[in-house]
Image (spheres, grey):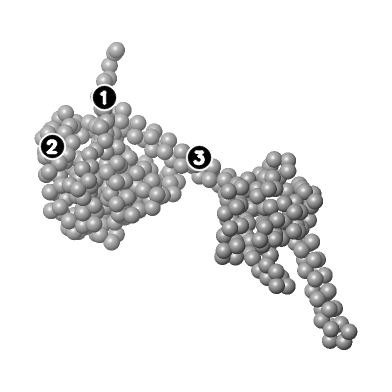
Amino acid sequence: MTKTHLGVEAALVKSESRYRRLFEAAQDGILILNFDTARIEDVNPFLTQLLGYDKDELIGKELWQIGAIVDIEASKNAVAALQTVGYIRYENLPLRKKNGDIVHSEFVCNAYDVEEEKVIQCNIRDISSRVDAEERAQQYQQLVRESYEQSIQSLTNLIGARDPYTRHHQSNVADLSVRIGAMLGLSASALEGLKLSALVHDIGKFVIPAEILTKPTPLNTHEIGLLREHVATGYEVLKGIPFPWPVAEIVLQHHEREDGSGYPRGLTSKEILLEAKIIAVADTVEAMSSNRPYRQVAGRKAALSTIDAGRNTLYDSKIVDSCLRLFQQEAYEFPELQIQPVRVGLA
């Protein structure tokens, strides 16, 4: 044998030794599979320790035959994909340990040639701690979300006990606002914030004298001034609650208008939050569409004509278009809610 051959052989031995050390010491699980049969040909110590199996319990078995594979059909599909495209990756593939516990894993497999023979190598990373952390975070977010909803419910109950018709109005405005927001492509989170904001957009009215809220004749200048204070009062009530959305600011702005003619700050289009613009349209339509015991209102047709006439001056044109489409093309109707007037006195 020539020196060249001896050198090549020594290099191969050294390379094999280096690979074996890396294979044995790796802190990720490694499976080596036969490309044609998907039978396990080798497994490193990390994976046997992770799953609790002896090496002999895994060698020679097809991938889907080992008890660790929870989803057998997914495993078979994975091997078929590997034999076709040579690569698969699972963000979170559950594996079952020998004792029955579930391990969440990131599962990456590649097919490649080794000395003119194809093999499949699967690298398996334990991501259980990350998944557990994400689940705890989701549970916490759910608790926080429920807390927000309970806060909103308490506030709507507050005004509902005094003025059930305002509560009904807020509920209808919330329903229409969310439908408009969805049509505009708002995210699920943004829609949730929009809904909560709309459910309390008139919460500040609890400080307005009842005779003003229920007055069947036009309000005088003083009464209009008192009524307009409800947005600032609502802002003060809500600003201390740490919502993940600008609920207090949305409530403060829902009577602002595109041309700056609204209140309380005379903001113009670019300064007004989108959610406040949506509520402005929904608020106008609902208020003009729904009768109250103390007054008859213009009705649905007049309400839609009003927002259409106010496009670009009072209301955002895209929001107006979405609202008109809901009523005129999709036959939208406000939810049917039963309002029970509050009675005060002896039973």
Distance, label 1 to label 2, CA atoms, is: 20 Å
Give the residue number, with chain letter if any, for mark 1.
340
First of labels 1, 2 by sequence position:
2
Residue 316, disc: none
Q: Position of residue 279 (x, y in %)?
A: 27, 47
Toward the viewer: 222 or 169? 169
Contact check, label 1 and label 2, Cβ < 8 Å: no
x 18%, y 36%: residue: 290
The disc placed on residue 297 is 2
Residue located at (20% from left, 34% from top): 213
Direction from residue 181 to residue 294 in the image, left or right: left
Q: Secondary structure at mark 3?
A: helix
Mark-to-mark CA distance, 3 and 1: 31 Å
- Residue 185 percent across, percent down from the top left: 33, 54
Q: Secondary structure at mark 1?
A: loop
Q: Is residue 29 left or right of 87 when viewed as pictured?
A: right
- The kind of residue on which mark 3 rests is Leu
User: Quadrant location of the C terminus?
Assistant: top left
Of residue 161 and residue 191, the one placed in the foreground of this image is 191
The location of residue 105, given as percent across then percent down, is 64, 53
At label 3, counting other C-alpha atoms closer than 10 Å, the crowd grade (few under 14, some 14-19, many 20 or more) is few
Q: Earlier in the sequence, mark 3 or mark 1?
A: 3
Q: Amino acid at mark 1?
A: Gln
In the image: residue 27, left or right of residue 244: right
Image quarter hosting the N terminus: bottom right
Tell me which corner region of the image, top left, top right, bottom left or bottom right, holds residue 197.
Answer: top left
The residue sitting at the front extreme is 36
The residue at the point 32 percent across, 40 percent down is 199
Can I make out residue 316 in this image? no
Asked if the residue at tag 1 contacts the one at tag 3, i.e. Cβ–Cβ closer than 8 Å, the answer is no
Name the disc covering residue 143, or none. Answer: 3
